[in-house]
Image: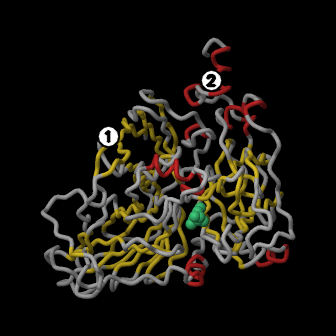
């Protein structure tokens, strides 16, 4: 079935957390409209850019774009940014049921609020491998009072200005900055939120019937924050991660990193005359942002009745052992495709914070990604070798590199970051974390791969060695599209390069990508027959199309 959407993207005045700011909305909505389809459907989005002075693209996060690499929505990688006033048709198939989302992939437009949910139901007649009576979307994000353009300038300045921690965490685009829903219960200094009624930042409550079971589709579109999600007095049963079924397991709370999605089930089995807190807290970075809150409202208990116990308290922000243990509990559901037994190529990627010409950057194997004017997909397909420096980045880093210390020489260089993968080969990627510029600091980075799911073969502490491969999980590794590296640790991923295209692989922390923390995998591009011209109307591909009489 085809599903048609007509979207207009524009700036709007909104108050996501009670304070007015500028957001990027779609068809007058922030977050953008929830898109819903069935596995096997073809989505058509006719997008008009109504941002008066800047381009835009939209990435369909978790959708593999099998056969449609030009619809992946990455500026300078899969397409030219859509100019103001222009339209672009995103046409692609959603082949797999699951919880996804979409978001801007140009500059800092995700931080400006350009995101929404994308839910794919199972095919007509198919069943999910679990049951529930109702469901809710929970789209999580973080919000700054400083606008996205100023954030972008700050990050690109010398001396460097860090954007800092977000002011507010948003649940479905809503948060409370000046007040706390749980002021009295959580000993917070803040005053109690007083809502008049239909404020746009009033929390959206989750209304449930006693004894029923619900599916929460949680996705994190944060620009920076790693989060922990919990419902007071209720256990969560994790059944899906990044659009793949997992072997169900039960937790009190769950960590969710930027770019990840989870489905969790819970049963409204607590005292029905009470309500319960739903809370979202910052993990992994020293939190300067209060938890985001909303209420699980048991019908017919009045929504105004505050829960009797304080909101659940998340594990300490720096309890990385807890986070690692949670990540290690995610296994594929029986029946999930298994990885090939061995890789054809292994790429080790060292993550470091560096200086390039005095500017603060992130680099991968000492290469800090800068994107060219001509999208890689087009320049590679049409052999335009002048479009970017053709020197490939290295497959490894100096084995003597001391990951536990700031780099002896923190200087790095800009580069194109393009790894060319032989078509249909199996690739292992080992992401190696290291110390940042400051001593005793190593941060969490959630890495997201476009165009594929990968198997997460393992996590380890310290520097990866060949021996670590013996401990890879080849039995039931989860399929995901986003996986974290923990401070001073490594994470091993495997995927098959079987989807022709130019695919971004990057830290999903938006300011980090902006500072160069990403690479591009180019695979099977000569096999692509024709790329729609409207995707390539810029740079050298734009010129090429003019030369060919615009055909
Ligand atoms: O990229 C980053 O920069 C700051 C800090 O390292 C320098 O101010 C920070 O916390 C990041 O994640």
181 relative position to 226: left or right: left
Which residue is labeled 1 in the image? 27
Residue drawn at the location 81% of the way across and 46% of the way down: 392
Quadrant housing residue 361: bottom right
Query: Are there few (<14), some (14-19), or many (20+) residues within 10 Å of tag 2?
Result: some
Which residue is labeled 2 in the image? 542
Query: Are there few (<14), some (14-19), or many (20+) residues within 10 Å of tag 1?
Result: few
Residue drawn at the location 70% of the way across and 69% of the way down: 433
Say what secondary structure mark 1 lies in: loop
Residue 424 image position (x, y, % from top left):
76, 49
Q: Is residue 137 above or below residue 299?
A: above
Quadrant housing residue 445: bottom right
Residue 27 image position (x, y, % from top left):
32, 40
Residue drawn at the location 43% of the way across and 84% of the way down: 252
Say which quadrant the C terminus sits in: top right
Residue 1 image position (x, y, % from top left):
43, 41
Residue 442 image position (x, y, % from top left):
65, 72
Distance in Å between CA atoms under marks 2 and 1 = 29 Å
264 relative position to 439: left or right: left
Say what secondary structure mark 2 lies in: helix
Q: Does mark 1 have its CB less than 8 Å from ligand 1?
A: no
Q: Residue furthest front?
A: 159
Tell me, yes or no, whether the two marked residues, 2 and 1, touch with CB atoms within 8 Å: no
Q: Earlier in the sequence, mark 2 or mark 1?
A: 1
Q: Nearer the viewer, residue 151 or 229?
A: 151
Q: Nearer the viewer, residue 13 or 264?
A: 13
Ligand 1 located in image quadrant: bottom right
* Residue 335, label in figure: none
Q: Is residue 252 above or below residue 106?
A: below
Q: Nearer the viewer, residue 384 or 412?
A: 412
């Amino acid at each position: 079935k085809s599903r048609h959407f007509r979207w207009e993207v524009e700036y709007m005045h909104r108050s996501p957390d009670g304070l007015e700011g500028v957001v990027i909305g779609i068809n007058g909505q922030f977050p953008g409209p929830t898109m819903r389809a069935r596995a096997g459907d073809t989505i058509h989005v006719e997008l008009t850019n109504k941002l008066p002075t800047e381009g835009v693209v939209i990435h369909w996060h978790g959708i593999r774009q099998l056969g449609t690499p030009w619809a992946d929505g990455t500026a300078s990688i899969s397409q030219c940014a859509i100019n103001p006033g222009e339209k672009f048709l995103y046409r692609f198939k959603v082949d797999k049921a699951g919880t996804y989302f979409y978001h801007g992939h140009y500059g800092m437009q995700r931080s400006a609020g350009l995101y929404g949910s994308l839910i794919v139901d199972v095919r007509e007649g198919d069943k999910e491998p679990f049951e529930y009576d109702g469901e809710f979307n929970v789209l999580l994000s973080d919000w700054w009072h400083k606008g996205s353009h100023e954030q972008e300038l700050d990050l690109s300045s010398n001396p460097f200005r860090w954007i800092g921690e977000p002011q507010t965490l948003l649940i479905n685009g809503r948060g409370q900055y000046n007040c706390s829903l749980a002021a009295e219960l959580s000993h917070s200094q803040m005053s109690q939120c007083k809502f008049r009624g239909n404020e746009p930042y009033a929390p959206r409550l989750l209304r449930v019937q006693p004894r029923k079971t619900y599916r929460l589709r949680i996705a994190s579109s944060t620009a920076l924050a790693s989060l922990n999600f919990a419902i007071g007095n209720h256990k969560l049963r994790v059944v899906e991660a990044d659009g793949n079924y997992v072997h169900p397991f039960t937790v009190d709370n769950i960590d969710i990193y930027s770019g990840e999605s989870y489905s969790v089930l819970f049963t409204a089995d607590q005292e029905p005359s009470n309500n319960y807190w739903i809370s979202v807290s910052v993990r992994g970075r020293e939190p300067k942002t209060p938890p985001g809150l909303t209420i699980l409202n048991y019908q017919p208990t009045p929504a105004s009745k505050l829960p009797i116990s304080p909101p659940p308290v998340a594990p300490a922000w720096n309890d990385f052992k807890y986070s690692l243990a949670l990540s290690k509990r995610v296994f594929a559901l029986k029946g999930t495709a298994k990885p090939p037994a061995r890789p054809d190529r292994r790429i080790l990627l060292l993550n470091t914070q560096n200086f390039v010409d005095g500017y603060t950057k992130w680099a991968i194997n000492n290469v800090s990604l800068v994107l060219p004017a001509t999208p890689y997909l087009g320049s590679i397909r049409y052999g335009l070798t002048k479009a970017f420096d053709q020197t490939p980045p290295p497959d490894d880093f100096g084995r003597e590199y001391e990951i536990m210390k700031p780099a002896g020489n923190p200087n790095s260089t800009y580069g194109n970051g393009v790894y060319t993968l032989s078509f249909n080969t199996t690739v292992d990627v080992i992401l190696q974390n290291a110390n940042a510029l400051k001593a005793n600091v190593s941060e969490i980075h959630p890495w997201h791969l476009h165009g594929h799911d990968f198997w997460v073969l393992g996590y380890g502490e310290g520097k990866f060695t060949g021996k670590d491969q013996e401990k890879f999980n080849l039995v039931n590794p989860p399929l995901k599209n986003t996986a974290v590296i923990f401070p001073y640790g490594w994470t091993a991923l495997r995927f098959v390069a079987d989807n022709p295209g130019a695919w971004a692989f990057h830290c999903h922390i938006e300011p980090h990508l902006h500072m160069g923390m990403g690479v591009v995998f180019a695979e099977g591009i000569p096999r692509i027959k024709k790329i729609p011209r409207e995707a390539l109307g810029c740079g050298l591909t734009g010129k090429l199309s003019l030369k060919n009489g615009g055909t």
